[in-house]
Image (spheres, rainbow, N blue to C red):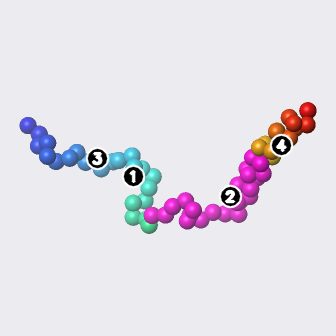
């Protein structure tokens, strides 16, 4: 009979896949980013603002 007091430990957990467990933990705002990432974010923001305000203004003008 198996000893049910010991929890089953899965050493190959999906939470560990692709992560360096020895590296210091960081969060997204602390992560480094390039000027290319800033430019892409700015373009996405401009397109979003244009859609958000452009469509209602275009419909109101009809």
- Residue 28 location, x and y as percent? 55, 59
Q: Residue furthest right?
A: 62
Query: Which residue is at the front of the view, 19 or 52?
Result: 52
Q: Are marks 4 and 2 in contact (CB under 8 Å)?
A: no
Residue located 44% across and 67% down the image? 24
Magenta residues, start to end: 25-49
- Residue 50 location, x and y as percent? 81, 46
Q: Earlier in the sequence, mark 4 or mark 3?
A: 3
Quarter of the image where the C terminus is located: top right
Q: Which residue in the structure is indicated by mark 2?
A: 37
Q: Is residue 44 left or right of residue 26?
A: right
Q: Which residue in the structure is indicated by mark 3?
A: 10
Q: Residue furthest front?
A: 60
Query: Which numbered marker is on residue 16?
Result: 1
Is the residue marked by circle 3 packed among few (<14), some (14-19), or many (20+) residues within 10 Å? few
Q: CA distance from mark 3 to mark 2?
A: 37 Å
Q: What secondary structure is the stretch in magenta mostly built from? A: helix
Residue located 70% across and 55% down the image? 41
């Amino acid at each position: 009979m198996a000893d049910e007091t010991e929890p089953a430990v899965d050493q190959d957990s999906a939470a560990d896949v692709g992560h360096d467990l020895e590296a210091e933990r960081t969060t997204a705002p602390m992560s480094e980013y390039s000027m290319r990432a800033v430019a892409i974010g700015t373009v996405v923001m401009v397109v979003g603002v244009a859609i958000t305000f452009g469509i209602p203004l275009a419909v109101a003008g009809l």
